[in-house]
Amino acid sequence: MLQAEETKPRSWFVDPRSMADASQHSAGGTAADAATTSQSNNQHTHHETSSASARRPDLELQRQKSIEQAIAEGHDADIPSDIGYVLDEAGEEKRRKSIADQRRRSLTRKRSLSRASRSRDVEKEAGAGVGADTGSEVNGKGEGEGGTTSDDEANLVWWDGPDDPANPYNWPTWMKVLNCVFVSLLTLITPLGSSIFAPGVAQLMAEFKSDNLELAAFVVSVYVLGFAFGPLLFAPLSEIYGRLIVYHVCNIGFIAFLIGCALAPSLEALIVFRFFSGAFGACPLTNGGGTIADMITQEKRAGAMAAFSIGPLLGPIIGPVAGGFLAEAKGWRWVFWLLAILAGTLSICMLVFARESYAPVLLQRKTERLRKETGNDLLRSKLDAGLSAQDYFKRGIIRPLKLLTKSPMCIIFAIYISIMYGYLYLMFTSISYVFTGNYGFSTSIVGLVFLGLGIGSLTGLFFFGAVSDRTMKRLKAEGKDLKPEARLTMMPLAAFLLPAGFFIYGWTAEKHVHWIVPILSHIPIGFAMVVSFMAISMALVDTFTLYAASALAANTVARSVFGAVLPLCGLQMYKTLGLGWGNSLLAFISLPLIPGSFLILKYGETLRIKYAIKNL
């Protein structure tokens, strides 16, 4: 009977509590065995005890190995005390299947992580060590949801070491400079189109037999309204398919609608073509900052951002200078032909020489190549969000709006720069009327009035670039964190110069003081606008590195709405209040920016960390 029992396959369920008390049981094994052996004869009991004692070391070793394996797979090391393991063949097979299921679930959880939770890795691999909050959700382990198994890590595709030449941070300097030049020229040409034909508006209205001043202003500002809609589409597309393909598509659309403007048969058609040319032209305004963040580390970024920022502010300023002479010599339609020629030439150069810089797209391409070469379908990019293109596009559409409504820093920055941008385009639509009416300037000469803003913008550009980079290098040398708020130190100065410039401009023009004085008053206005624009753009890029395009898109949407709407009421405001009180009103509205700038410097980091948006 005993011999028959020992030949039967047995299922040993080992409870850790029973193992601790095993020495007190005369039978060992399970609780059922103990109850049975208590009714058996002494010989049987002695035999069972010896058999169980022989098994205990193996069972304890198997249990310890199982716990270690569970810990290695990322499961909680605090194993409940009532867990046991089935050691027969059927139970072992179930355990293997359970582990496989856990690995698959772990892989699914890993794929559902936001790429933003790994955005620091992009710069850390190049030694940048970004400390900015990306607004992503990361748990206390810094890994996001779920653990990382050894199999998961083996299937993650990343750069081939810190010096991988495929990593845009490791590109040669000439390649980074070339790509920055392309982006900077795009951001110069597209804003150039917003104001280059402003001096020729009088010709335009005469040709189409209209004397509606609001409509004349809208023809100029509707282009900026396109800037408000384009980023909502092109920013998420660049984070799905890469920066370069979006640049190419938008360049083609921009050129096509510029040609439409040059051939417009009516004022209504011109307004429609202007809107869509602005929408396609908005691409570099949002994606350009992301391209720079893709290639250049934080402490070296100010110079490149200075070149990038010169376009949105200097382009609209130098546009009327060239547009005034061109419109007088060739007519207003040639303004659009010139823009189409410039954009077409740059587009061809980008097709030949520009390179993709967005790390998630580059790593995804590398992953797909390695899958084909190795046949391993489990390979995935370390920055893969695990979303379909459709889901990611939906999230990308919502992301700028989420930033614009839920991030206090983005909201404050949007209000701040929207006031500046609205004032800038108000000046574009009013300067021509002010200086032709009050000072008798011709169409070509009135364009030179914008040189005051241009001088102020260039001064602010070089001043900010030098001071910002020096500040970041000093902080790094002192071993301090490179926080985005370090970019904002000059905003109080800009906030003070803006209302001061408008007070001087308004009252000197009102009193017909020599024309050089109101032009010189534009210098502090241009300085304030460029410094504020650059500081805010760089703070957004440093904060939302991987999603810089979406952060800039949120800012572009807000400021573009102000830039499109405010000029519509500007001329009527000057008619009602006069130049003195009209510009004084603008100055009074901007006065709260002065204390606001100091508050941002003091509490900006707290707001950024406390109200960071999760799951962007």
Image (cartoon, helix red, strand yellow):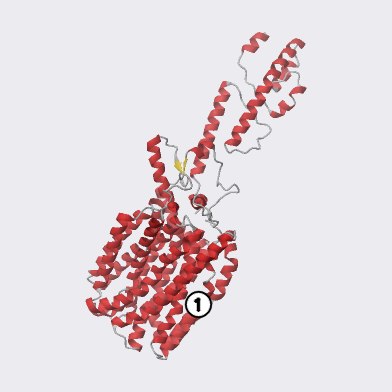
Q: Is residue 208 above or below residue 23?
A: below
276 or 310: nearer the eye? 310
161 sits left or right of 331 in the view: right
Residue 408 seen in render: no
**Residue 191 screen position, x and y as percent:** 36, 69
The image quadrant that residue 214 belongs to is bottom left
Q: Which residue is mark 1?
A: 590
For the N terminus, give its image quadrant.
Answer: top right
Residue 314 seen in render: yes
310 sits left or right of 591 in the view: left
265 sits left or right of 51 in the view: left
**Residue 373 screen position, x and y as percent:** 38, 36
Q: How many marks?
A: 1
110 or 349: nearer the eye? 349
Residue at 59% across, 61% down = 478
Q: Tag 1: residue type? A: Ser
The image quadrant that residue 507 belongs to is bottom left
334 sits left or right of 564 in the view: left
**Residue 337 screen position, x and y as percent:** 25, 69
Residue at 40% across, 69% down = 310
539 or 592: nearer the eye? 539
Label 1 crowding class (10 Å Cα cut-off): few <14, some 14-19, many 20+?
many
524 or 561: nearer the eye? 524
**Residue 246 screen position, x and y as percent:** 35, 56
- Mark 1 secondary-structure assignment: helix
